[in-house]
Amino acid sequence: MKKIKNICCIGAGYVGGPTMAVIAEKCPEIKIHVVDLNKERIAAWNDEDVTNIPIYEPGLHEIVASNRGKNLFFSTAVDMAIHEADMIFISVNTPTKEYGKGKGMAADLKYIELCARQIAKVAKDDKIVVEKSTLPVRTAEAIKSILENTGNGVNFQILSNPEFLAEGTAIDDLRNPDRVLIGGDSTPEGQAALNALVDIYAHWIPRERILTTNVWSSELSKLTANAFLAQRISSINAISELCEKTGANVDEVAKAIGTDSRIGPKFLKSSVGFGGSCFQKDILNLVYIAQSLGLEEVAHYWHQVVIMNDHQKRRFAHKMIKTMYNTVSGKNIAFFGWAFKKDTNDTRESAAIYVADYLLEENAMIKVYDPKVKHHQIQSDLNYLNTRTAEENQKAVKSENCPYEATKNAHAIAILTEWDEFKALDWQRIFDQMLKPAFVFDGRNILNKEQMQAIGFQYQGIGVGE
């Protein structure tokens, strides 16, 4: 079995950066180059002040500080890193297509193909290529075809090694995962490549937690895992609407069913809706694959998970409008949180973006406080929707560096991210400086309804009857 001495990771994003940092920490004998064409991103990874790295993830900057410049390097020298590497991880973005066949559902694989062609052009000796990005089933076949037909007579082995990271806990997930999944060919060469990657993870992960499959099972397992998790969230959110109409409490219902060992308690927290880069994208990809194979019933089943999630975000905004006397025009609304979940600065598909968009359509004025999301990212997220001009978004949506500044003269507060610090705020102080009646719409159910009402707030959570 070939001993891996040099690793190249193409893509310095939310997957590539943390994954390679932990491998560098656990495998000091392996030299790791994380490469990306985005010069600003690489510059941020190399910032002398390691707290300025482009990704906020608890524990990440400490690992980068300990290993950067020793066996962990960040650069834009893609060709050099490919040439030196024994193993190449592909960790580039696979967004949903915005054009052509499969628009709005299929994964856009143009960056994956560009990576494959670059590897084929540069590689002069045998390489192990690892799919780390989330990909449709049988993508490895396309990568292998490109490598074998446009390469330099080099032998390539393709492995699938999907990530199962939860943002906010990614470092813990990498250091102590439930499982590591690796898919490879059944040929002797394929098994040797697979074992080379197993050996890397075995530096710190018990071998019984390292699962090996064929490539296709590995690719499909990632999509299926995300679909099942998102399904649970949409299911409990569907029940939350029923709870509001019947006087039930969705948290009590979730606790009751979560104690059933057949169901379990995880991913039963009702909220304004799920976000992030994976769930919606992967489900829509699964829907597209099913449709492409003529499996219409399968496609309709999984598509409903996304439909329910969109409904939950829209319902939250409409409830705000209805509660505030059917108009938010000219009203000041403070948003607590913009990231899609706590302990990350990732805003992709965040519920806050869509709730803001609905309220802006009704001429609301919004001030955002998020401890880790910068103003330019908030504006970029809104501009991406193309609902209104950038100038209109800039005028209607402001950012504050302090939660108390965000709530001065506000008519209402919408809690869109479950940051722990929101629970520890001086809510009496906030109430005193708001316009009355002072509304709190808790999209994450993190506050105590009775305590908030005792202060004087008009409080509404998710899935709680009037």
Image (cartoon, helix red, strand yellow):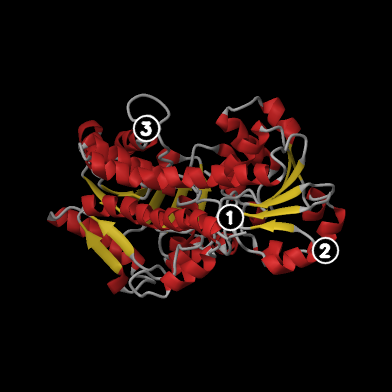
Task: Give the vertical position of 102 relative to 215 (above or below).
Answer: above
> Which numbered circle lies on residue 428?
2
Residue 136 percent location from the top left of the image: 30, 43
Q: Could you tell which of marks 2 and 3 lies nearer the N-terminus?
A: 3
Task: Give the vertical position of 101 relative to 434 (above or below).
Answer: above
Q: Are marks 1 and 2 in contact (CB under 8 Å)?
A: no
Quadrant where the image shows the N terminus: bottom left
Q: Amino acid at mark 3?
A: Lys
- Of helix, strand and loop, which one carries label 2? helix
Q: How many numbered tags mark residues here?
A: 3
Q: Residue at x 30, y 67 (%)?
A: 210
For disc 1, the neighbor class at 10 Å (few under 14, some 14 to 19, many from 20) is: many
- For residue 421, what is the image quadrant? bottom right
For disc 2, the neighbor class at 10 Å (few under 14, some 14 to 19, many from 20) is: few
Q: Which residue is mark 1?
A: 344
Q: Nearest the camera: 286 or 148? A: 286
Quadrant where the image shows the C terminus: bottom right
Q: Which residue is mark 3?
A: 110
Residue 124 shown left or right of residue 293 in the figure: right
Nearest to viewer (mark 1 / mark 2): 2
- For residue 57, what is the image quadrant? bottom right
Q: Could you tell which of marks 1 and 2 lies nearer the N-terminus?
A: 1
